[in-house]
Amino acid sequence: MSIPEHFDLPCAWYGRDLAKTPERWTQVLSAATIAEIEQAAKDFAKTGLRIDQISPDSFVLPNYGQELLKLRQELQHGLGFSLIRGLPTDTYSIEECCTIFCGIGSHLGKHRSQNALGHLLGHVKDVNADLNDTNVRIYQTAQRQTFHTDSCDTVGLLCLKEAKQGGDSLLAATLTLYNEMVKRRPDLVPYMFEPIATDRRGEVPEGKKPYFMIPVLNWHDNKLTGLYQRTYIRSAERFADAPAPHAKHIEALDLFDEIANDPAVHLTMRLQPGDMQFVYNHTNLHDRT
């Protein structure tokens, strides 16, 4: 495995730099674009299709659709994330918000269920769930998420209401974390490419184990990508047959977390109602306070 010791790509960014230039990653919707989006939602409602059937053909955006194609390229080959601001969600019903969010998402990729229940759209909301319950997902609690990726290419978030306390959205660039690890502790870097047990949190496909083995970092087709959820790595230790991570592996993960939590490395966003955030999981981790 011949991996570069340093990546100098748009997605190897530092939060301290991007915080000074929000125009690089923020798009403010114009009145004309909002009108086009609202018309697309009205037209979709008339079709009688279900939300899981939404597509660029049923949620038609003649002009803004071209901008979303550019955004898809930015997610894959640029910074790896974007914030879209200005959608007047307080004037819409929940159903209209869902339609608009999924309709815009359909121009960026294909919907995929995010849990064993087949939900295409979930709610990040404290429902008083107990994180000690190994079938609970962190987004159902008020606990901090910690830096992680989701099991899809791009994850989208639509803010309907601000949190009463906390709730800031944090992003960290996977390639930046790698670059920093190479600088600080190159001896620990190889352990990030070793498979480690990760808990399925009760969502177990038929015939599979309740955990799976996967490395945090992967090098394939000359691309470095990441897949990470430290909480689920820790909870996988409850399975007797799951290989326990050794001391060096844990040391590597601790450094990875330490770098991600550096305010100079990650970017903090305070989302407003109507904000839509899209993040490319292969090159970015996200977190919530």
Image (spheres, grey):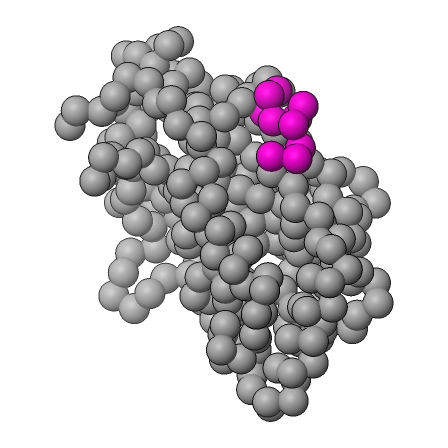
The answer to whether 267 appears left or right of 128 in the picture is: left
Position of 137 relative to 43 (above/below): above
Q: Quadrant of residue 100?
A: bottom right
Figure quadrant of the N terminus: top left
Position of 135 relative to 79 (above/below): below
Give the x, y percent position of residue 212.
30, 49
Nearest the viewer among 36 and 139 is 36
> Which residue is at a point 22% across and 24% down the rendered structure image?
3
Position of 34 relative to 79 (above/below): below
Give the x, y percent position of residue 208.
27, 60
Nearest the viewer among 67 and 274 is 67
Position of 59 relative to 172 (above/below): below
Exactly how many numbered labels are in the figure? 0
Residue at far left of view: 1
Please state the extent of the stretch shown in magenta in the rendering. 15-24
Q: Is residue 100 magenta?
A: no
Nearest the viewer among 24 and 255 is 24
Figure quadrant of the C terminus: top right
Q: Is residue 22 magenta?
A: yes
Give the x, y percent position of residue 101.
62, 64
> Which residue is at a point 66% across and 35% down the rendered structure image?
23
Give the x, y percent position of residue 186.
30, 12
The answer to whether 212 appears left or right of 176 in the picture is: left
The answer to whether 30 appears left or right of 288 in the picture is: right
> Which residue is at a point 59% across and 89% down the rendered structure image?
47
